[in-house]
């Protein structure tokens, strides 16, 4: 059964592929997750480790995913199976499909919040309750039982609709316009942030590391997970996208481009959010609600703030849609091949299942707020922990080892377009030794196992 029944869909152009990969990478991870995790993990020291993780581990694994996907021209499970039939590497593929279900389930909840905020700005902006602030507004909204589910549903509906139509038609076009717009808007808002009273404090929070924070092993795993989450790495989203790429395109440039743009987005988002956090006296470590409490405050103080708010939450939702699409596509591509389903059938069925899996994450903020699953975390945080702290890094580890040790070196160098160059050889050795060792060390360190050894 190795023959492909129909010609596989392909991107129209190299730019189309780059934008799709960027569309997957840039999303809630850069703005919502980055800001609250950086806020909780102490800012600059976290940012530093995060950028190191992107450069030394993220980019090489990103390259590895593109290489695997393009060589195999298959979904994530099929990629491992067709390149190394009968070998255990395919576990990485199944982990990837599982991660797609878990991440999209809670991603849909938060993206639903963003969609709701967008509609609020259509009608005069969010109105804090009498005597309350935007924190109270957000609190009342996201702890309700039914209402947030409506928005989560609408978001999932949009994601399913795009995957339903297909990769090229659905994914490639919208990214070309919306992505650059979001970049411009975030830049403008960061510029405004610099005029706020809290700008100095924000700059030192983000860029002047408190070195003692490096002694906390938890910060390394937080940074590594954020790097994986933000780059859409370790679960085959980029294997799947790479599989729609023709053999002609050069990979290394695309990988570096995607990773730098993605990190730049996160940093500028930090410059947009933290000045306001300090100006308005919001706690940097106030958790997943951070942007939903901080930014409305900014927009209410800003000239024409309603328009900025409208645009911002529109573009944030659009960025979340293109990331959601790449998550759903991982599962859909797998089920299409495995169950012989049509794209349409697969996207509706899988999208519906993921919506239902996401419901407890939403309820965990309100009706089920007493429920804790992993180490005292609420339901959404537990889902995030399972996927981002465990599945993605392990998936990344498997992907690195797969190319590093599972492929002939010459084969990997050729498939990646590096050829037998110095940089190609460095890449291989990062995948063979450095990245796996770093991931394992970070795990051991954060579980305290390393303390037992030394
Ligand atoms: N990278 C996306 C974001 O930053 C989230 C994502 C994770 C998408 C994993 C696909 C796979 O929002």
Image: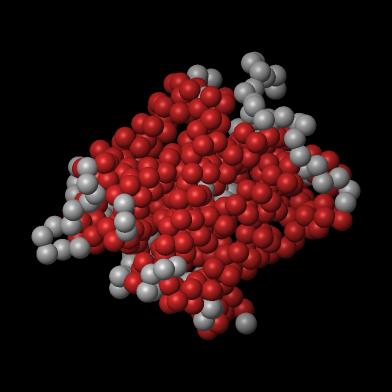
Determine which quarter of the picture holds residue 74. top right
Q: Residue furthest top?
A: 5
Between 278 and 341, which is closer to the camera in this rendering? 278
Residue 391 is left or right of residue 52, and the answer is left
Between 295 and 72, which is closer to the camera in this rendering? 295
Q: In the image, residue 430 lies at what x, y percent? A: 75, 59
157 is higher (above) or lower (below) than 370:
above
Q: Quadrant of the C terminus?
A: bottom right
Q: How is the image coloured?
A: secondary structure
Q: Residue furthest front?
A: 303
Q: In the image, residue 46 lies at what x, y percent? A: 52, 70
325 is higher (above) or lower (below) than 120:
above
Q: In the image, residue 57 lies at what x, y percent? A: 66, 59
Q: Quadrant of the N terminus?
A: top right
Please tell me which residue is depicted at 49% across the width and 44% down the height of the picture: 181
Q: In the image, residue 101 lies at what x, y percent? A: 44, 41
Q: How many marks?
A: 0
Asked whether residue 109 appears in the rendered view, the answer is: no
Residue 141 is left or right of residue 188, and the answer is left
Residue 93 is left or right of residue 184, and the answer is right
Please tell me which residue is depicted at 75% across the width and 35% down the height of the picture: 249
């Amino acid at each position: 059964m190795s023959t492909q029944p129909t010609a596989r869909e392909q991107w129209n152009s190299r730019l189309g592929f780059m934008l799709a990969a960027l569309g997957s990478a840039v999303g809630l991870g850069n703005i919502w997750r980055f800001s609250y995790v950086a806020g909780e993990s102490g800012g600059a020291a976290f940012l530093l480790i995060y950028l190191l993780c992107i450069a030394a581990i993220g980019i090489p694994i990103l390259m590895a995913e593109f290489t695997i996907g393009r060589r195999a021209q298959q979904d994530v499970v099929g990629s491992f199976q067709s390149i190394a039939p009968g070998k255990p590497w395919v576990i990485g593929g199944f982990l990837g499909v599982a991660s797609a279900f878990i991440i999209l389930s809670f991603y849909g909840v938060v993206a639903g919040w963003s969609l709701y905020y967008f509609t609020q700005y259509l009608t005069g902006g969010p109105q804090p309750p009498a005597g309350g602030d935007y924190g109270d507004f957000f609190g009342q909204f996201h702890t309700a039982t039914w209402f947030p589910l409506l928005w989560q549903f609408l978001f999932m509906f949009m994601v399913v609709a795009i995957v339903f139509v297909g990769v090229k038609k659905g994914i490639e076009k919208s990214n070309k316009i919306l992505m650059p717009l979001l970049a411009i808007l975030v830049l403008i808002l960061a510029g405004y942030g610099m005029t706020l009273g809290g700008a100095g404090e924000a700059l030192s929070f983000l860029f002047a590391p408190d070195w003692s924070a490096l002694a906390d092993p938890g910060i390394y795993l937080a940074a590594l997970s954020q790097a994986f989450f933000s780059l859409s790495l370790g679960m085959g989203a980029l294997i799947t996208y790479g599989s729609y790429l023709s053999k002609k395109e050069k990979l290394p440039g695309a990988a570096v481009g995607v990773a730098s743009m993605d990190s730049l987005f996160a940093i500028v988002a930090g410059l947009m959010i933290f000045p306001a956090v300090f100006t308005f006296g919001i706690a940097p470590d106030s958790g997943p609600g951070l942007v939903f409490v901080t930014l409305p405050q900014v927009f209410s103080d800003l000239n024409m703030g309603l328009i900025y708010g409208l645009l911002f939450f529109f573009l944030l939702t659009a960025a979340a849609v293109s990331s959601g699409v790449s998550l759903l596509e991982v599962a859909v591509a797998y089920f299409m091949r495995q169950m012989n389903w049509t794209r349409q059938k697969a996207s509706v069925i899988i999208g519906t299942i993921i919506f239902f899996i996401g419901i407890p994450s939403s309820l965990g903020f309100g009706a089920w707020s007493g429920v804790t699953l992993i180490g005292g975390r609420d339901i959404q945080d537990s889902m995030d922990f399972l996927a981002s702290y465990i599945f993605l890094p392990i998936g990344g580890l498997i992907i690195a080892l797969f190319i590093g040790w599972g492929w002939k070196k010459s084969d990997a160098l050729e498939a990646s377009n590096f050829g037998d160059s110095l940089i190609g050889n460095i890449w291989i050795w990062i995948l063979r030794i450095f990245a796996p060792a770093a991931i394992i060390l970070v795990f051991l360190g954060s579980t305290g196992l390393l303390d037992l050894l030394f």
